[in-house]
Amino acid sequence: MSTPGPAVEWLDSEPDQAALDRNRLAGLLFELARAINRDFAAKVPSLLPADPRLAELRTILMGREQALLARLARRLDDPEQLAAAISQILPSAIVQAAARDERLGQVLAPTVERAAESSIRRDPRALVNILSPVMAPAIRRSIGEAIESMLQSLNEALKASFSWRGLRWRLEAWRTGTPFATVVLKHTLVYRVEHVFLIHKESGLLIEHVAADPAASRDPQLVSGMLSAIQDFVRDSFADSAAGEVDAMRLGELLIWRSDGPYAFLAAVIRGKPPESLREVFESTLAQIHVERRQVLHRFDGDTTAFPGLHDQLAECLLQQARPRDRRTSPILWGLFFALLALIAWGAYAWYERQQEDTQWAAYLRRLQAEPGIVVTGAERRDGRLYVTGLRDPLAVRPEALLDGFALAPAKVIGSWSPYQALDPAFVFKRVQASLEPLQTVELRLEADAVRAYGSAPRHWIEKARAVSRLLPAGALALDLSGVQDVDMTEVERLRASIEAQLIRFDTDAPRPAPGQEAIIDSVAADLRALAELARSLGLSMRTTIIGHADATGKDAPNLALSLGRAEVVRSLLRTRGIDPDVLSVRGAGTLEPTEEGAIRDPSRDRRVSFTIRISE
């Protein structure tokens, strides 16, 4: 007689797993050893592969490793899980790779360059916004200098036109055939050569530098390097241009003129507006230097001691021209001055209004960014209007409603909002409430870490709530349904408990139920039909085990056969009452599962049939 298996347990119960595993392992090893010893020569080849106990033994011994390998395979096969795992170590890997050598920067440089080029091609305004803090002051300074120069030239031209000196200059222009403006500039121009650099053309090294006494002097080597670098940059950037060298460059109030020779070039830093004739002085000096020191320049290796007397020769280029300025101002210039003053006042007022509007606009943008469910992605001023773009959750407040607290005209503010779902807890809670049918027996609460449901609900409502929970965005609050009692499962448990509580009695050595047991069998059949229909509607599977028992009278083998026969009789009676035989199974327990323990017990209580029901998803 084989050892009876354990009673069928409810799926969610978890006994002492370690103890069960040890008992199962010991039993399997014992049974396997006995089988191998009994019929080693004939049955080992066919027994081992087909014996289910080997599979169960393998599960006990290597179940944890198999589960670990399965989880690892799923993570490697799933791009989302693999990306999440790599993202945890990617920042540290990049830091270590960058600290080890420069290969990471060399590999990423082309990609970053292409990304920057694509970004500029797609939206040049992004680069303009980045450079505007640097470009705007330089542009304002350039405009101021241009206006100052224009006013100075205009003042000189007006004085020259409405004075005896002006008439004399006009006569000179008519006599020489030179434009009047050129004559005016010739007589009113003021300039001073402050620095002269002689720089080797091939290496960019400084050969000699002279400066006027009051001029502010920087590191000559640094300046020469800068001039050479600018020349190389222009040559490389405009390789197809006909003009291969930069001969003039302005730096604020300073003008840099360059004259080129075969082996060296001369760079002069001039303050003011020099005449073109000054360039001839520089070129003449440079030509003389090449004639006198051609071989030394050709073999120059950085040794400046091979150029005696060069300092005095370059010092002859430190020329200056100054004439006393006439302090008298033309009446017309006074009129232009007051007109310009009025224009500046109007511009200052417009600037003040613009600043006030910008202040309100910045405050409004900060208010929008602080509002839950609103994400500002862009803001700009265009064509006299204020444009703002971003993302807005349908449950968030309308941006137009926030304008009331700011001094901004609603007609000037144009918003463009794309819908999205915010992960703010309040929005998630509202979204969950709107997605589920309200039940009086269920209460939803917004707590710190989740949206929790409390109460009782039918199975279909719980399944719908689980579907809503799966549709919530990643990173949002989870929907916790652990506090909701399944009404349908409660009924399943009630029917299960009712059936398992029933016992069908038998007389001594009788295979059929004792008189008066028909009502119990009818009750069991009715509960089984109700339980099967409810389990089918809930998508559950049900299995009922009919267990036959016998008292301790007689031998074990006949008692086991008698108990199995009693279970078969009850199954047959249930089939006649409409129970599907596929959900019924029988087991004979013999005398191994008595109702009472101890030396004194009632044998009639052991002559019975009991029921065990297993329900699973």
Image (cartoon, rainbow, N blue to C red):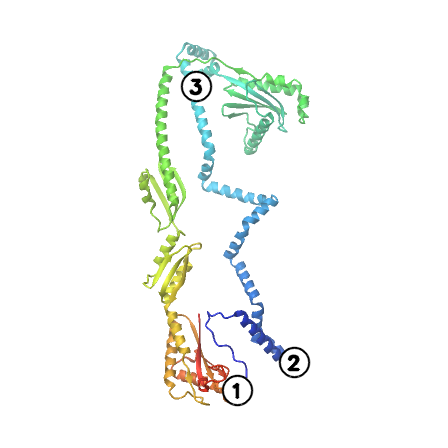
Residue of label 2:
41
Residue of label 3:
152
Residue of label 1:
556
**Residue 350 image position (x, y, % from top left):** 35, 30
Labels 1, 2: front one: 1
| Residue kind at label 2, given as amino acid type | Ala
From the viewer's perspective, tell me whether residue 176 is left or right of residue 383: right
- Residue at 53%, 21% in the rendered image: 270
Q: Secondary structure at mark 1?
A: helix
Measured Cα–Cα span from mark 3 to mark 1? 129 Å
Q: Quadrant of the N terminus?
A: bottom right
- First along the sequence among labels 3 and 1: 3
Q: Is residue 262 visible?
A: no
214 or 458, nearer to the observer: 458
- First along the sequence among labels 2 and 3: 2
Q: Is residue 397 visible?
A: yes
**Residue 242 image position (x, y, % from top left):** 55, 29
Q: Are marks 3 and 1 in contact (CB under 8 Å)?
A: no
| Residue kind at label 1, given as amino acid type | Asp
| Residue kind at label 3, given as amino acid type | Gln
Around disc 3, counting alpha carbons within 10 Å, would you say few (fewer than 14), some (14 to 19), or many (20 or more)? few
- Residue at 62%, 16% in the rendered image: 312
Q: Secondary structure at mark 2?
A: helix
Labels 2, 3: front one: 2
- Residue at 63%, 29% in the rendered image: 203
